[in-house]
Image (cartoon, rainbow, N blue to C red):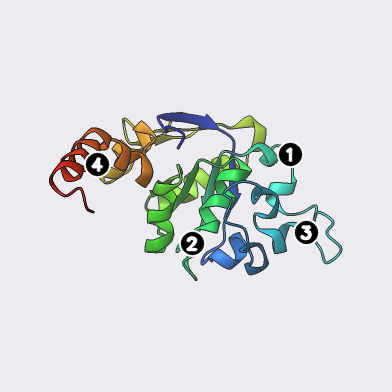
Amino acid sequence: MDKFDKLTGIAAPMPMINIDTDMIIPKQFLKTIKRSGLGVNLFDEMRYDADGNEIPGFVLNKAPYREAEILVAGDNFGCGSSREHAPWAIKDFGIRCVIAPSYADIFYNNCFKNGILPIALPQEQVDILMKDAERGANARITVDLEAQTVSTSDGETFSFDVDPFKKRCLMEGLDDIGLTMEKAASIDAYEAQQATSRPWV
């Protein structure tokens, strides 16, 4: 998993509440078990018309938001069914951080396991960041995980809370497999001991 430390990038504004996982990645794209290739279908039903053509007014179809690395959204982001494909699609598009007032719990935790930082901030602070994001290429939002701050392009800074364990995992690029591999020496020693004491197993 990619490490997350400090990010400065274009933020796409999506001032909608209750963006659910089916909006993020519709059900017809859930057949794959690969984490790559889903970015093109992120927000598919809002990005494309019935013939597969881009809808010009949708934010991620506009320059500069095609290159967005941060998403600023409304309350209760990631609600709905618990599909891990939702953070896969977000990450594959290139977004590394989502900022919203609140999240569905399962989506929130899945983000950390897939290298995405979900930041929860009060609505008034999200509103300020939303306005900054609407400036497009003229604005860059900075997210500093070590300092636990988000800064607007004008230098206004907000602090956010994050679980220390989840923070360490993101900063060190550790997913569940990575965490297990940290114990590789102990696992190997246990298996060797078991092979000696219980060779029939």
Report the Cα–Cα distance between label 4 and label 3: 39 Å
Mark number, residue 164: 4
Q: Mark 2 points at which residue?
A: 78
**Disc 1 designates what residue?**
63
Q: Distance between the residues labelled 3 and 1?
A: 16 Å
Label 3's element? loop
Between residue 166 and residue 161, name the one nearer to us: 166
Q: Which residue matches tag 3?
A: 48
Label 4: state its secondary structure: helix
Earlier-in-chain disc, 3 versus 2: 3
For badge 4, the amino acid type reads Pro
Q: Amino acid type of disc 2? A: Gly
Earlier in the chain: of badge 3 and badge 1, it is: 3
Q: Distance between the residues labelled 2 and 4?
A: 22 Å
Residue type at numbered disc 1: Ala
Instruction: Give the mark nearest the N terminus, 2 or 1.
Output: 1
